Image (cartoon, grey):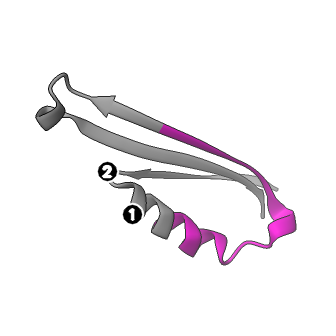
Amino acid sequence: MVQVKLFDCEHEQDLEENMNEFLSDIEDRNIIDVKYHVAAIGEAEADQVYCFSAMVLYVK
């Protein structure tokens, strides 16, 4: 069965840690695709909020 796991973090290091923890339990051959996206919200540099997100498509 194909599954999707979504990740959403404010810091790229948190995203990396969360994804690595999840992927450690998935066999490489079961990973179909990984999509990555970064969004910045706000106009002034001091007021910007970043959103780092990823989606892992895998076979369970």
49 lies left or right of 24? left
| Extreme-right residue of the structure | 29
What is the quadrant of residue 22 in the picture? bottom right
Q: Does the segment drawn in magenta span residue 38?
A: no
What is the quadrant of residue 13 in the picture? bottom left
Label 2: state its secondary structure.
Answer: loop
Q: Counting other residues with Cα less than 10 Å from the Cα at mark 2, is it few (<14), some (14-19), or many (20 or more)?
A: some
* Residue for point 78% across, 64% down: 60
Label 1: state its secondary structure.
Answer: helix
* Residue for point 34% across, 55% down: 11
At label 1, the amino acid type is: Asp
- The tag on residue 10 is 2
Confirm or deny contact between disc 1 and disc 2 (CB under 8 A). yes
* Residue for point 36% across, 42% down: 51
Q: Which residues are magenta?
A: 18-37
8 lies left or right of 23? left
Residue 5 spot, x, y in % from top left: 60, 54
Report, in whole angstroms, how far the alpha carbon at label 1 lies from the one at label 2.
8 Å
- The tag on residue 14 is 1
At label 2, the amino acid type is: Glu
42 lies left or right of 60? left
Residue 41 spot, x, y in % from top left: 27, 29
